[in-house]
Amino acid sequence: MIIRWICDNCNKKWIYPVEKCIYCKGEIVKQKGTKLKVVGITKVTIPSPMHPIIPYNVLLLQDEFENRIPKKTMKDYRIGDVFIEEKAKTKDAVSVVKVKYDIYEAIKDIFSLLSINELVKDDKLLIKPSAVMAAYQYQAVATNPEVIDAVIRILFEMGIKEENIIVAEQAIIGNDSFDAASKSGILDVCKKNGVRFVDIAKGAFEQVKIDGFKFNIFKDALDRKVINVPIMKTNSQIGLSGAMENLIRFADENTQRNMFLNGIDTTLPKFAMAFKDILTIADASVGMQGQGPLTLGEPAFLNFLLGSRNVANLDTVFCEVTMLQVPPYVQSESNSGVKKIEVVGNELDALKFQIKPPVPGDTAHPDIKVIDGKACPACFNRMFSITSKLVGLRGNQLNIVMGPMLTNDMLKGHDRIVLFGDCAISKSTELGTKPMAKISERLDEIEQLVLFKKLLTSASETAITPVDKVRSKMKNFLHNVTR
């Protein structure tokens, strides 16, 4: 499809959205060209950072209104050939669509390519964005609010009433869901469209048993049709925060902790089985690279969207396009490999662009490293917060050890070990580890911060003393009094 924005009065034309004609103040109409033919071809044989796979062709496509647009493809065409985007033939197909100024039209294209026709006007819908902490849209932590707005608009066009739609999210443990939704702009989208925002953390929950595991799942997610709308991000802990990972916050806090305690690579695929026929519209309009999924990561500016009824297939395709390693929890569900996944909309080789992978163990602080035994979101979030607040205070390197999935091999060769969180403390006792200090996750963050500051600036291997603990409690008390 080729889209142009045209003044209804003076016929001036733009390739990007405008609200009013700057020449005559006339109304703007959207012109969509759907009958495309090839009018020009350039074959490229020299690779570049943005286009590493060669050879490829750049087609010049023309529509029935004589508008033109370039299109990258790995396939060979001839001048005069008709250009057609084939629709998906299988239920588990993945659609990948480039965003050409208009997110709404890109999502409409996904619906068309996947033949989404199972939604009817009386359906009750739940839209699940990703908004894990309070961060602005440009930081790429949360789903682009324009994507949420476009999904809601499309549902309205399908006849679904606003009272039958809710937008529901739960921030990462330790953060506030409404703060996250508000700062990202998602709450404003809900208010604009008259759609209710729901904090999943407040329940109600229903217990579901799958393969011997018990999960407490948000009841509305089981009773309504779910449209999963994650932002695609690297994750320094589990590799990728994407379609499947976004589902985890349908679980209550205890379930999330237990999923990590029992091995997230095993429990997350089982948890995803609770959601049947879920539709995912994944936001990679910007996306995140590097040390995601929180504000330590960097915007990636990917400029495409993905859609699928299969969360594992979608995550696998995203990893293929961005040249990331497919995480173990995704591999267990999508073990057929990307070559057996039907992809429509754009060719993967034509989109491939390497983004920065996460570096396991790195934190915001140059002197603090993490040995992560798959810690729960509460410990992960708190560690991220503390290490960020210590930036600027240099000292002796610390190794923060977290999570229940620790082994002696992971700890071998490391000194100045600080056990953080009850899971790590319990596991280290089993392994016979002799740490520099132990800090419980149940302490207030101010107390934890004071203790970490002491450890960072101490050159000795001396553990935290009773005096240090008293000082941390006094600091916390004074902080609460002066607030």
Image (tube, rainbow, N blue to C red):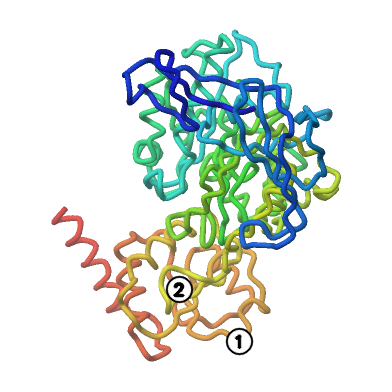
Residue where numbered disc 1 is placed: 413
In the depicted view, which residue is nearer to us: 224 or 36? 36
Left or right of 93? Residue 481 is left
Determine if residue 270 is in view. no
Quadrant hosting residue 314: top right
Question: What is the x, y in percent for residue 473?
Answer: 26, 66
Question: What is the x, y in percent for residue 367?
Answer: 42, 79
Labelled disc at residue 60: none
Q: Residue at x 47, y 13 (%)?
A: 163
The amino acid pointed to by label 2 is Lys
Determine if residue 85 is in view. yes
Left or right of 23? Residue 93 is right
Q: Residue at x 57, y 16 (%)?
A: 124
Question: What is the x, y in percent for residue 384?
Answer: 43, 62
Q: Residue at x 38, y 15 (%)?
A: 27
Question: Which numbered disc, 2 or 1, marks the residue that appears first in the sequence?
Answer: 1
In the depicted view, which residue is nearer to us: 73 or 10? 10
Estimate how packed mark 1 is, as few (under 14), some (14 to 19) or many (20 or more) residues with alpha carbons within 10 Å.
few
Labelled disc at residue 438: 2
Asked if marks 2 and 1 touch (Cβ < 8 Å), the reply is: no
Screen quadrant of the N terminus = top right
In front: label 2 or label 1: 1
Residue that lies at the very extreme toward the left in this rendered image: 482
Question: What is the x, y in percent for residue 357?
Answer: 60, 63
Left or right of 363? Residue 160 is right
Q: Spatial distance from mark 2 to mark 1, Cα to Cα?
A: 19 Å
In the depicted view, which residue is nearer to us: 386 or 357? 357
In the depicted view, which residue is nearer to us: 49 or 332? 49
